[in-house]
Amino acid sequence: MLVKKRALAVGAGLIISAVALSGCSGAGTSSKNVTLTLATVNNPQMKDMEELKGTFEKDNPGIKVNFVQMEEGDLRAAVTADVASGAGQYDVVTVGAYEVPQWGAQGWLKDLTPSLKDDKAYDVDDILPPVRTALSVDGKQYAVPFYGESSILMYNKEMFAAAGLTMPNEPTWQEVAGFAKKLNTAETAGICLRGKPGWGDLFAPLTTVVQTFGGTWYDENWDAQVDSPEFTEAVNFYVDLLKDAGEKDPVSNSFTECLNQLSAGKVAMWYDASVAASILEDPTSSKVAGKMGYVHAPVNKTEESGWLWSWNLAVPATSKNADAATTFVKWATSKKYQRLVGETLGWTRVPPGARTSTYSIPEYKEAAAAFAPITLEVMNAVNPKQPGLNPQPWVGIQYVTIPEFQDVGNQVAQLVADAIAGRSSVEDALAKGQKIAQAAGDKQK
């Protein structure tokens, strides 16, 4: 993977939580009488971790864990400034799969490889292989996953049955488009897809469509491919599908909006993050609980097209308590922790998409029967090194792991959103996007 040795800009999607990693040899202070500082985002999984931290503190006398909660944007700014300056205020950070390889190559994160390998009880080989690949650079692993996800196609089985339609386990995009048109009515959209501008909004699903149509953001020489025939075909397909059978005002919709529409029974299908399934199956918030089906991400020319994302725990190289931080991170991402969550808080709250063994726990298999098998199947099937037809000079599926991609993706997404809204053609949008992407590509050469 090619990463320039220069100061890295902050990546989009970084949720920073300070939680400690496992045993970085020779680093940090003694694990006795230590207070670890975790800068954390206020999301449900991190709230669960904070709720259960007393168990860790009881089992590790002398180590206290202090969670510092901030808004996501404030976290990005605070943790990046701390790590880049070497201040060492935080002992653990939660970073996305987009940031880990960049920060690791820059030397901002501890190399966890030795400490993970040496701890047989931790069982690093139990981590889902594609996730480990996404968190590694040149054979060195710089973070461990707290939870992960891929993308799947979710559909209302009752609507399909009423229309006499059968969804295959591995559909093509052409089949999905046909289903969507047949199921589209004045009251119910055939499909919901993200249209809100943003590299993590519109381009999260759209990049996977581009890849399965044979396109890519860059070739191996970092020459932009945004206006290539394959990229153009994929975007035209996406825009036409939204126009023919998509939800109303797609430019205003991202994950939450599509989730709300599908859970209310106003949409027949939705292609998005696998983590949504657990919400759709909650009868207290979803009208379609028990009525949903889940299959692989639709394809065109590739065998798979799901994305891969994880929120991960890492120890900054600047941590003054790296040994104790490592002890905590191992605990928070261990098999033992997952059982603690299930037995204490409920099995559907176990962090998904990180460990293979999670999917063999009888209680979890029963609680998550509707969506756990397909999630594991898809996450193990994706290839973050080459998700499309052609080799790429970075590791990642729905993003490009260069600092500039946040800005490139956001700008091109706005151009495509204009095409979705009918304010420009796809061809004009991508011609402008090509210039934006090439300027960033030139910096990688």
Image (tube, rainbow, N blue to C red):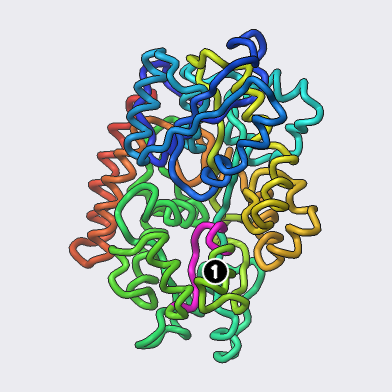
Residue assigned mark 1: 280
Visible in this render: residue 160? yes
Residue 342 location, x and y as percent?
Answer: 70, 52
- Which residue is pictured at 50% across the width and 20% down the height? 316
Residue extent of the magenta highlight: 267-277
Visible in this render: residue 220? no
Quarter of image, res 376: bottom right
In the figure, 313 relative to 309: above or below? Answer: above
Residue 227 location, x and y as percent?
Answer: 33, 49
In front: 411, or 361? 361
Residue 88 location, x and y as percent?
Answer: 44, 16
Quarter of image, res 71: top left
In this picture, residue 241 sits left or right of residue 435: right
- Which residue is pictured at 47% across the width and 19% down the height? 108
- Residue type at mark 1: give it: Leu
| Number of disc labels | 1
In front: 170, or 108? 108
In front: 270, or 317? 317
Residue 194 location, x and y as percent?
Answer: 38, 61
Residue 50 within the segment the image draws in magenta? no
Q: Secondary structure at mark 1?
A: helix
- Which residue is pictured at 69% across the width and 31% down the height? 58
Quarter of image, res 29: top right
Residue 276 within the segment the image draws in magenta? yes
- Which residue is pictured at 33% across the width and 25% down the height? 443
Q: Residues within 10 Å of mark 1 (few under 14, many from 20)?
A: many
